[in-house]
Amino acid sequence: MLQPAVKIILAMGAALLLAAAPIRADETPTEPAPQAREQSAAATDLVWPSPPLQPRIRYLGSVASPEDIGRKKGFWRKVWEFIRGEEEDEQVARPMAVALDGRDRLLVADTRRGRVHIFDRRSGEYSHLRGSGMQSMRLPIGLAVDGGDNVYVADGELNQIFVFRPDGEFDRLLDTAAWLKRPTALAIDRARQRLYVVDTPAHDVKVVDLATGKVQSVIGQRGEERGEFNFPTYVALDRQGRLAVTDSMNMRIQIFDTEGKLVSAFGKHGDGSGDFSAPKGVALDSEGHVYVADAGFDNVQVFDERGKLLLFWGTSGQEAGKFWLPAGLLIDAQDRIYVADSYNKRVQIFQYLGDGDAK
Amino acid sequence: MSGLRLTGCSGGRLPMQLALMLMLLFALARGAEAARDISPQRECANCHIAWLVDFNRKDVTPLIAYNPRPVEATGKQDVVSTDRMCFSCHDGFVLDSRFAWKNRQNFHPIGVKPTDKVKIPTVEGKMVFPLNEDGKVYCGTCHSAHGVAWGDKQSPVFLRMKNIDSGMCMACHLERGTGPDEGNHPVQEKLKEIPHALTEAGSKFGTGSSVICQSCHRVHGAPEKRLLAVKNSNSELCGTCHADRYAHSPAEAGRMGTHPVNIRPDKVKIPQAMFDKGAKLGEGGTVICQTCHEPHFAGAGPKLLVAPNPQSQLCQGCHIEQRRVANTKHNMALVNESDKNIRGQEVGQAGVCSACHQPHGGQGPKMWARPVKHGDDPVAGLCLSCHSEGGLAKDKQVGQHTHPVGRDMSRLGGTVELPGYTREGIKSVGDGKGRVSCPSCHDPHQWDPLDPEKTSKPGDEGSGSNKFLRKPNGPEAGLCLTCHKNKLGVVNTKHDLAVMAPAERNIKGQTPAETGVCASCHLPHNGKGARMWAREPQAGVDPVSSTCLSCHNPKGLAKDKAIGANSHPLDVPIANIGITAKDGQWSAPPQSIAQPGKVLPLYDQRGVPVTEGGNVVCGTCHDPHNWSPLAKGSPSGDPRQTKGTGDTSFLRLPNDNKGTLCANCHVDKGPIALSKHNLAISAPEAKNTKGRTTAETGVCGSCHLPHNGNGAKMWARATGPGQDGVEVLCNECHRDGGIAAKKQTGANSHPLRVDLKNTGGKTTLPLYTSEGKKDHLNGKVACATCHNLHQWDAANPASKAGAKADVEGGAADSFLRQPAWPAPTLCANCHQNKQQVKNTDHDLAVTAPEAANIRGQNAQQSGVCGQCHMVHNAAAKERLWARPLGEGNDAMERLCRSCHAAGKAAAAKLPLKGSHPAKVNVISNPGSQRESGGYFPVFTPEGVRSGSGIITCPTCHNAHQWNPLKAEEGEGRNVEGDARNSFLRNTSDFALCADCHGLDALFRYKYYHGETSRKKHMLYR
């Protein structure tokens, strides 16, 4: 399954050194970019690794406000927003998690704004989730979307999981009082109708039956041993339903199968490429590569499932392709990589260009 | 410990805080030492990544620059204490520390050098809380990753020492935590209840709910300036705990008995000196807590005042106008300096303001510091705390009859320059708002209204020009007239004693010249009666009238204007005449042909004007302060020479020839104008006792005078012959030679002066005493019992049928109180057991509609009763018979035979032997059988019922009831009777005759009543 990844192992040494400094790619992408507007926003064509090596990652653009998805505001809307002061609230301020729904809308959990931004890149419309009628969200930090396009939002300050209907209306709060200390990342396995809830202060991951809302099982406990956690934070599922967990203070990634059995654990604390300094968001692409954002290095490192470093890109900075405390990661069905670039107040989008020699 | 030096402690003041701090510092000194060992272990390397054993490997791309710096145990934190380091974990995932950064402008200052108020403690010469290289406060001054153990929930992590009960705050800021004696807000005082608003705002409280630094301040992320957890620019923060002292409006402050906040100091001037000492105003320049108080480094003592308040000096700084009280007898220290206010402070010590006012915890409005007397008005209750029995000013009481308080100023109408007060003590001038209270006239802080500097001392007697009055009140009565402008008309009237009786003295022995016109009659305090009466009130009448009658009595000052024995009634409910007043509106019975006019003043039993119900007194018709209802203001000319008329005489309405004054209320008497009792119709030339015709007096005045009447009912005419108070009035006209000589009652007339108690009768008609007073209990039958002299047709007040001098009345009108036709309502009111005659054979309207009584009246004209009985001018004395008498052996038979005779109405109903043998003289007493039907009356030959007498028609017959067993009307047709009815007193099938005649009675009956039977019977053959 993952062996194609081996083929894209790059030459060690100089190649990796160069990889941190992306350069302009001469050729335009052969496959049509799904986000034309975002593409146009990018002034230059950034790819990694740099030529002459074969590019594997291409910068597509970023989303920081409704204008970035092409929303045009009329005069009256500007006046209205000026009066209501809404405009600022629609700017992404502290993106921590990213999700996509069935309509390819981009959902961004913003802990500073206390809302989930919804960018509909097809229609150019903006909307948001704010909370229930009784309670606004305070710290929306985890996001997941189920097969019916219901949106699950973890609030790390209220210690609640909000559920919104596809039309954006508040539906309910999950009954978590009995089992949840503080939720962070969420993930939904649509095939198995499961919600994974990372309970960071409890140092475990709760597996919740979406139909009943009951905890089916719990993965992990506090500790350093394999399968144990020390402040687990982010999670991601691959296409087979395997669960990757960022075990933050153990400085590693652990991968579990659908039965909760440990498949793989890799990573250690360090300052070199392939080490972890402050591992954050985790995601897996269609080929099973493991992407890990690191807030210490301000980069994204790509590993195979056993932890072998394949590629990394990004460094500290505010320009395109650079990061400032990157947080949540998401990879969609087209292998687009979404990085919640938290201190840069934007979501950066990249394309995994895939295995093979065509490019 | 010997090496420990505390530069921040001034020594010995707060042993508890000091001990706490020492203990914590000791722990810190040991713990910090142990934490400084460099370790490549994982926990250290989380931040100190450069300490990793394999840091800076050569086989991979280094992603973090290696920039080694010498490690020095300086206590400072600058190697890894960067935003990035903190937020790589504290971003909400691993931990959520955003609160510290939410409001970055309001957090503990860094990058500044500590002021001299901050004393950083040192241990062995080193600062426990180090400054950075520039000598400025920085994060590391308070925080260290290696300070307090992580797991200790009592104190936040990464502090250099535990901050239990704000101990760490006070280590440097000791001078702010010293407590009230040093001018700081108390700390470590326990709160009874922690305000929810504060916990919501992130405030913290110490052991046992005690107040600590963090109760008000939040070191990081405070929403407000000065690191305050709650906005305090209008003392909102102060108000969360001190809610009992934090009023949102002056009215609320009045209710709470506390100094107002949240108001603009428009009436006072806050001196610059107070601002110089730290006083602050709120948003919009309002007075707030911090105007007088400072939470830290307050200038004056335990109350945290910005400046000292000995002898109420702080109060007087703003309340300049009130300072003068110190030189008056309202300075309690002059009255009795050992007297105590409610706080138990001796007034001599408390200060001139604090003797009466407490800025907080007062007993009522105006932050009153003395016991409040509860009464009509809360503000007056303050004054009465001294000016009452047992009070400091017990010899200066206001008495029972004093100027009212608690009344709405709006009653005065228009603007008044004297102040009114709300129940909360809020003063308002010139807008008609508020209520009258003591300070409406008095300024308790200034003795002399014209000279603010004038002093007074206990024992000084006041005059109308001082006495803490707001305006002088000398002979010109300026103070009274400020409000009572509508009373100014009294000047130069007969009620102006300065003109009428200049030598007359009021109860205080003052002449009008000394007191002014008002005080001749009214004293604002200690009056002798209602209306603050300044004269001796007349006993025995209502409170209001007692004031008028104090002069208007046969011995009084106005003895030539006394009201006489027959005067308009006083102290009677207005409801007696069928009308009532409520809220300035009359309500009259729906059948009234007239509507009441202006609502006149009515009073309750205490003499207080009322808006609902109420009694009629002198003041109802008279306005003693206005001579004429037509022309307001003082009249010209010498009042001693003026003669009163119906348009003057202090009347509220003119008593003119339209009867305006009388008819204003007596709507029930209105119909008289439409009858011949209106002498303008029947006797226009007639004059009353005042020699005035009806055209001059109006319809009422021809018979009635409001005062000094010539008999009952305030009679305005001479009286005629008669034996009771009413009869003499009627007979003045209804007599030979009188106006109504044609309408006399004749020799055979309904008896007068019958006492229904003696006859066992009852009635709803009015009864009268021999003096002519209406008295339902003890009264007797009089003319006015049956007659309402003021209405011709009882059923129709608007009828004009009686408005002709020569009109003949009938049973339905004739000034009868109730109609006697078509039903005998009037007669039956007394003669209840006679009314069943209606619609029987004896109702001539049924059996002989063409028949007429001796006056030629048919049944409709005479009424049912009137066909046989004539109330006046009857044909016979017996039963006031109304028909020509028939032939008969005795008087009773002659009555019956007036119809039951050949050729008469009942010619068809003739017994053959109409008379019981006259020789039979029987004894029959009613006894107990009268009601049970076993009584058969016997009569004298003259027709008088008697205990022994002859048997005659009514012995067996009750002419008024057809069926003895059914006390009800007849069927309205001429029915043939039998032995069970036929007006018999008892059914005849057995009892009637057998009662006397035994079992053969029937034969006897038949012998008398039927010839055929008599002939048939063998005994008689």
Image (cartoon, rainbow, N blue to C red):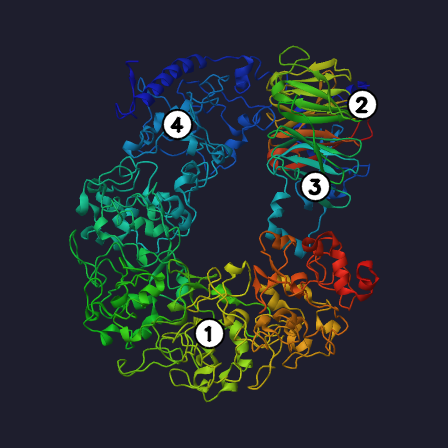
Q: Amino acid at mark 3?
A: Ala
Q: CA distance from mark 4 to mark 2?
A: 56 Å
Q: Where does label 1 land, which residue?
A: B727
Q: What crowding class fits label 2: few (fewer than 14 Cα within 10 Å), some (14-19), or many (20 or more)?
A: few
Residue B19 image offset from top left, x and y in percent: 33, 19
Q: Residue at x 52, y 35 (%)?
A: B102
Asked if marks 3 and 1 touch (Cβ < 8 Å), the reply is no
Q: Secondary structure at mark 2?
A: loop
In which quadrant of the rendered image does the N terminus of chain A lie? top right
Q: Residue at x 68, y 61 (%)?
A: B956
Left of B575 or right of it: where is B890? right
Q: Nearer the viewer, mark 1 or mark 2?
A: 1
Whether residue A190 is visible, yes or no, is yes
Q: Residue at x 44, y 38 (%)?
A: B240
Q: Nearer the viewer, residue B480 or B654?
A: B654
Residue B20 image offset from top left, x and y in percent: 35, 19
Q: Secondary structure at mark 3?
A: loop
Q: What crowding class fits label 4: few (fewer than 14 Cα within 10 Å), some (14-19), or many (20 or more)?
A: some
Q: Where does label 4 land, which residue?
A: B190
Q: Where does label 2 land, which residue?
A: A192
Residue B567 image offset from top left, x and y in percent: 38, 71
Question: Residue B138's quadrant in the figure?
Answer: top left
Q: CA distance from mark 2 to mark 3?
A: 38 Å
Q: Where does label 3 land, which residue?
A: A42
